[in-house]
Image (cartoon, rainbow, N blue to C red):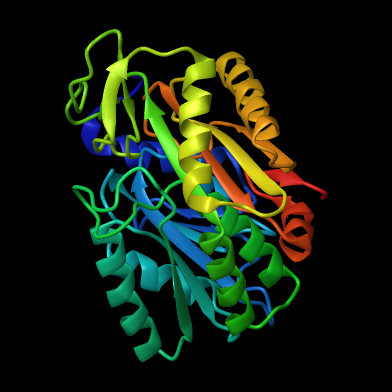
């Protein structure tokens, strides 16, 4: 691993992020990443966060058109309420703050507590829960579906609405609509290794894969012998479509989990597009790359969001963050 010691890996990464992105204010000690021009007068501020190890989620999505702030926890560990309150106070302009929360028990509890504390300080807070993973209903760290790739869609589209000056209730409604129209499914080809453990976090024998894996390595639906890209695409896309059942065009995220090169991801995207075409599902926009990762896990996920005209417009709106940028 390219680290110093496990105990400082998050702080070291934040120092490097600060050096690479002067457009951000990175508080290494207090673990908050904020867009430098915050608070932006009259605009709702989006705040998200979660355990480190999923980069560029969430700190890489801080900037105009997306998040106002992010709270990185320790690796695969929820940030604490104090971080979230600190972030909300740093970005609130008086128009309110929307917390974007992935459905993991620690995140849900800590963001709930943070919302109460922030409201005690006079900050209006709304929350949206992201729970898009169709692989399993209840997992090791969740009640209900896990929050995965749809987090990017929620943060981008709701962030664009906030950038346009939409009020808090409207931004919250759009975020909920995006989550409700999004479904994901992930596949692991290898286990990930955390800095603290220094080795695989779960046992996945050579020549096998995990269908429906979670972003922390949580088990999915089943294990099978290794499959081809074509076979994986058939299985994954059908699993998503069986639940989503879109009646119109979709946004497609073909996401790498950290250890899969773009050469393979683009090849996999070709298969995903083939399946969608065969199933009669038009694709309005496609994003391919490592966006919601799981350290060094080799694997991929597919997220589809049924897009209407407004959601497409907001998706296309300008964004400028370390990991996602267009139109500016």
Give percent across and percent down for residue 159.
64, 63
Residue depicted at 30% across the width and 46% down the height:
136
Q: Is residue 37 visible?
A: yes
Task: Please state which of residues 200 and 43 is positioned toward the viewer in this rendering.
Answer: 200
**Left or right: 153, with 239 as reference point:** right
Give percent across and percent down for residue 30.
35, 58
Residue depicted at 36% across the width and 12% down the height:
226
Give percent across and percent down for residue 213.
32, 34
Q: Is residue 15 visible?
A: no
- Report the number of numbered marks: 0
Classify residue 217 by image quadrant.
top left
Task: Please state which of residues 56 and 286 is positioned toward the viewer in this rendering.
Answer: 286
Quadrant that contains the N terminus: top left
Give percent across and percent down for residue 50.
36, 53
Task: Please state which of residues 99 and 212 is positioned toward the viewer in this rendering.
Answer: 212
**Left or right: 131, with 138 as reference point:** right
Task: Please state which of residues 221 and 322 is positioned toward the viewer in this rendering.
Answer: 221
**Left or right: 206, with 248 as reference point:** left
Q: Is residue 313 above or below residue 114?
A: above
Residue reaching furthest to the top: 207
Classify residue 101 by image quadrant.
bottom left
Residue depicted at 55% across the width and 39% down the height:
19
Classify residue 208 by image quadrant.
top left
Q: Is residue 187 above or below residue 292?
A: above
């Amino acid at each position: 691993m390219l680290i110093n010691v496990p105990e400082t890996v998050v702080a070291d990464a934040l120092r490097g992020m600060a050096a690479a992105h002067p457009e951000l204010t990175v508080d290494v000690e207090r673990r908050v990443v904020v867009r430098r021009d915050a608070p932006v007068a009259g605009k709702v501020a989006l705040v998200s966060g979660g355990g480190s190890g999923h980069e560029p989620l969430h700190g890489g999505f801080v900037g105009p058109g997306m998040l106002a702030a992010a709270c990185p926890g320790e690796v695969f560990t929820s940030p604490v309420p104090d971080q979230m309150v600190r972030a909300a106070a740093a970005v609130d302009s008086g128009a309110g703050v929307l917390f974007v929360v992935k459905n993991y028990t620690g995140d849900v509890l800590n963001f709930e507590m943070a919302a109460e504390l922030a409201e005690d300080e006079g900050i209006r807070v709304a929350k949206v829960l992201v729970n898009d993973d169709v692989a399993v209903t209840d997992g090791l760290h969740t009640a209900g579906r896990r929050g995965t790739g749809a987090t990017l869609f929620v943060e981008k589209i709701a962030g664009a609405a906030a950038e346009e000056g939409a009020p808090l209730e409207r931004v919250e409604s759009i975020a909920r609509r995006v989550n409700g129209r999004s479904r994901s499914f992930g596949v692991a080809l290898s286990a990930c290794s955390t800095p603290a453990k220094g080795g695989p976090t779960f046992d996945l024998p050579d020549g096998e894969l995990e269908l429906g894996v979670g972003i922390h390595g949580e088990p999915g639906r089943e294990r099978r012998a290794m499959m081809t890209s074509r076979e994986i695409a058939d299985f994954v896309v059908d699993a998503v479509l069986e639940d989503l059942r879109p009646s119109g065009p979709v946004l497609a995220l073909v996401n790498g989990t950290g250890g899969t090169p773009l050469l393979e991801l683009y090849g996999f995207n070709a298969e995903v597009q083939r399946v969608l075409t065969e199933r009669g599902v038009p694709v309005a926009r496609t994003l391919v790359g490592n966006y919601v990762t799981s350290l060094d896990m080799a694997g991929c996920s597919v997220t589809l969001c049924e897009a209407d005209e407004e959601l497409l417009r907001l998706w296309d709106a300008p964004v400028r963050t370390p990991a996602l940028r267009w139109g500016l």
